[in-house]
Image (tube, rainbow, N blue to C red):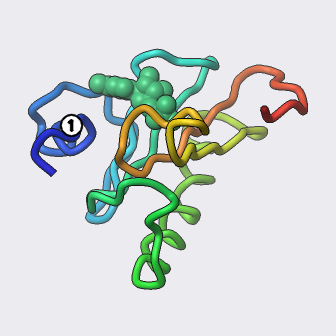
């Protein structure tokens, strides 16, 4: 999508700090980290949010969830949290599906 920030990152039009990439996904450090490790994992395909995940995305989502623990290990995390926000009320500010991988500090049990 032309004016999507994360699509621009994928095209190299906006700089990013790459953590991982393959043919399906890209991962980079969040520009405003909320934990010592705060990595965003995004599909190369523009999907607006988790609310738009459809059956045809099943293998992509399976792939993402296979790679997340690899990235956590690469970041030396044993304990980590994965968050995805869908919609403004849930805190989504970028309309391109992304998973926040957070770790490196004690986060507690409150999710909202
Ligand atoms: P969300 O609020 O769940 O939509 O998360 C969007 C995340 O993208 C936020 O944590 C932002 O800090 C992050 N973000 C926005 N622009 C950039 C950028 N250019 N590079 C890295 N992270 C970004």
Q: Nearer the viewer, residue 2 or 103?
A: 2
Q: Residue 105 location in percent, x, y?
A: 76, 20
User: Farthest residue in the front direction?
Assistant: 89
Q: Which residue is mark 1?
A: 9
Q: 27 left or right of 15?
A: right
Q: Nearer the viewer, residue 96 or 100?
A: 96
**Point 83% across, 22% down: residue:** 106
Task: Please state the horizontal and vertical placement of residue 18, each as a whole percent of the image.
Answer: 32, 35
Task: Specify the farthest residue to the right.
Answer: 109
Q: What residue appears at the point 26 percent right and 64 percent down from the top-left corner? A: 23
User: Is residue 6 toward the left or the right of residue 8 in the image?
Assistant: right
- Label 1 crowd bin: few (<14), some (14–19), many (20+), radius 10 Å: some
Residue 48 x, y percent position in the rendering:
36, 54
Residue depicted at x 9% and y 32%: 13
Quadrant in the rendering for residue 108: top right
Residue 25 position in % (x across, y down): 35, 57
Q: Residue furthest bottom?
A: 55
- Judged from the image, the quadrant occupied by ligand 1 is top left
Number of callouts: 1
Instruction: Name the element at disc 1.
Output: helix
Give above or below for 1 relative to 102. below
Q: Is residue 103 above or below residue 73?
A: above
Q: Is residue 42 visible?
A: yes
- Residue at image point 34% right, 60% down: 47
Q: Note whether ligand 1 is within 8 Å of mark 1.
A: yes
Asked whether 111 or 18 is in front, the reply is 111
> Based on the displayed image, in which of its 4 quarters is residue 44 positioned?
bottom left
Decide if residue 29 is in sight here: no
Looking at the image, residue 66 sits to the left or right of residue 55; the answer is right
- Nearer to us in this view, 89 or 21: 89
């Amino acid at each position: 999508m032309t004016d999507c920030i994360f699509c621009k990152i994928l095209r190299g039009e906006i700089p990013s700090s790459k953590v991982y990439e393959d043919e399906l996904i890209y991962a980079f450090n969040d520009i405003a980290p909320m934990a010592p490790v705060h990595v965003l994992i995004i599909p190369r395909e523009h999907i607006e949010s988790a609310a738009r995940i459809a059956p045809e995305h099943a293998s992509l989502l399976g792939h993402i969830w296979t790679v997340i623990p690899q990235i956590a290990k690469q970041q030396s995390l044993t304990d980590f949290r994965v968050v995805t926000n869908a919609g403004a009320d849930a805190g989504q500010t970028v309309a391109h599906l992304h998973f926040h991988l957070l770790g490196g500090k004690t986060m507690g049990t409150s999710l909202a």
